[in-house]
Image (spheres, rainbow, N blue to C red):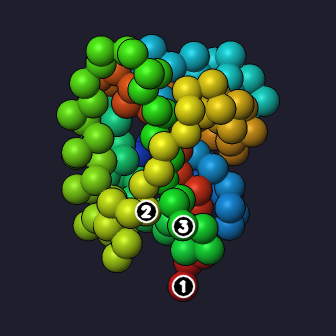
Amino acid sequence: MLKGIPKVLSPELLKVLCEMGHSDRLVIGDGNFPSESVGKDSIVIRMDGHGVCEILEAILQLFPLDTYVEQPVKLMQVLPGDPVETPIWDSYKEIVSKVDARGDSAIGQIERFAFYEEARSAYAVIATGESALYANIMLQKGVVI
């Protein structure tokens, strides 16, 4: 065991976070996200018993967001006409604002199918048990200063 490491972060996930370099991307997918097929060329880490907010908050304690891009955090945009509400996004904004001076302006949206395409080239994909819809989030790693 180590001090100061959030307990939700497994040794496997810590190793992946350490391996990632500047500009590498990490996807945290909700329970409906096709993690295994989208992540077939990536590292897929199963965290089925956990929600995205819990994992996001723990990761951002260790993971610097990229300061060389305007929006290092990307959300999967709701399809036009889809009557889905996304209250979890408010939680994401709070979590990101705690660690990044840009606040919620560090968060952008990507059209659903473009999100899948970008996720295919992510370094790693985390499969969660999150039940909220459109709860998928992509993080771009920055430099540790």
> Where does label 2 land, which residue?
106
> Where does label 3 land, which residue?
70
Give, as a three-letter code, the residue at label 3: Glu
Q: Earlier in the sequence, mark 1 or mark 2?
A: 2
Residue at x-position 63% and y-position 18%: 36
> Is residue 33 toward the left or the right of residue 49 in the image?
right
Residue at x-position 21% and y-position 34%: 87
Q: On residue 145, which mark appears?
A: 1
Residue 30, horizontal then vertical, whole percent: 41, 25
- Dot 3 lies on which element? loop
Give, as a three-letter code, the residue at label 2: Ala
Residue 71, horizontal then vertical, whole percent: 51, 60
- Cβ–Cβ under 8 Å for marks 1 and 3: no
* 87 over 9 or under it: above or below: above
Residue at x-position 26% and y-position 67%: 98
- Dot 1 lies on which element? loop
Work out which quarter of the rendered image holds the N terminus and state it. Answer: bottom left
Residue 16, horizontal then vertical, whole percent: 61, 49
Residue 144, horizontal then vertical, whole percent: 56, 77
Q: Residues within 10 Å of mark 3 (few under 14, many from 20)?
A: few
Give, as a three-letter code, the residue at label 1: Ile
- Taking the view exactly as shown, the residue that stands out farthest to the front is 81
Residue at x-position 33% and y-position 60%: 104
> Is residue 118 toward the left or the right of residue 81 in the image?
right
Q: Earlier in the sequence, mark 1 or mark 3?
A: 3
- Cβ–Cβ under 8 Å for marks 3 and 2: yes
> Is residue 23 toward the left or the right of residue 140 in the image?
right
